[in-house]
Amino acid sequence: MRRSQFTDSEILQLLGEASAGVPVVEICRTSGVTRRTFYRWRRRLGGLDIPAARQMKELATENLRLRGLVNNLFERLRATENSTTTSPTARTPQPPNFKQREQARATRIAAEKCGGAVTGRFASLRVNA
């Protein structure tokens, strides 16, 4: 994703000008942004001040870092689980309901990656697509 050339404080300044009565078209023309971008900014940062916007950005960064740690822990757990359950020398025949178990496993893995949000009949299609 491309970074914005405007900082959050600059965006908040432009939003403040609009709330003070300056026409949106004029703000967009002088700052060099489209009206669509301006209204997207208003939807995202509408009622925030500069410290609140900074705190929101810090929380988003921390959330991203924590998600990475959780994903690493899940991968380690899955690797140790796979290494203890399957030995390379002994192969066992697959039970008849193997396809159903694999589909349920794929759904669980997809739910872990999406934070538990993948449910429903077409969950595997959304993940594999």
Image (cartoon, grey):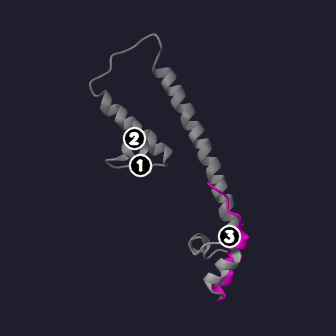
According to the picture, the residue beneath numbered tag 3 turns out to be 52
| 100 shown above or below 1 | above
- The answer to whether the residue labelled 2 contacts the one labelled 1, judged by CB atoms less than 8 Å apart, is yes
Residue 126: percent from left, percent from top:
40, 47
Does residue 65 show up magenta in the picture? no
- Please tell me which of labels 1 and 3 falls first in the chain: 3
Q: Count residues near mark 2 (Cα–Cα under 10 Å), then give few for <14, some for 14-19, many for 20+.
A: many
According to the picture, the residue beneath numbered tag 1 turns out to be 118
- Please tell me which of labels 2 and 3 falls first in the chain: 3
Residue 35: percent from left, percent from top:
58, 75
Q: Quadrant of residue 59?
A: bottom right
Q: Quadrant of residue 70?
A: top right
- What range is drawn magenta here? 1-21
Q: Residue at x 44, y 42 (%)?
A: 110
Residue 78: percent from left, percent from top:
51, 31
Q: Point out the residue furthest to the left here.
A: 96
Type of residue at label 3?
Answer: Ala
- Please tell me which of labels 2 and 1 falls first in the chain: 2
Does residue 8 show up magenta in the picture? yes
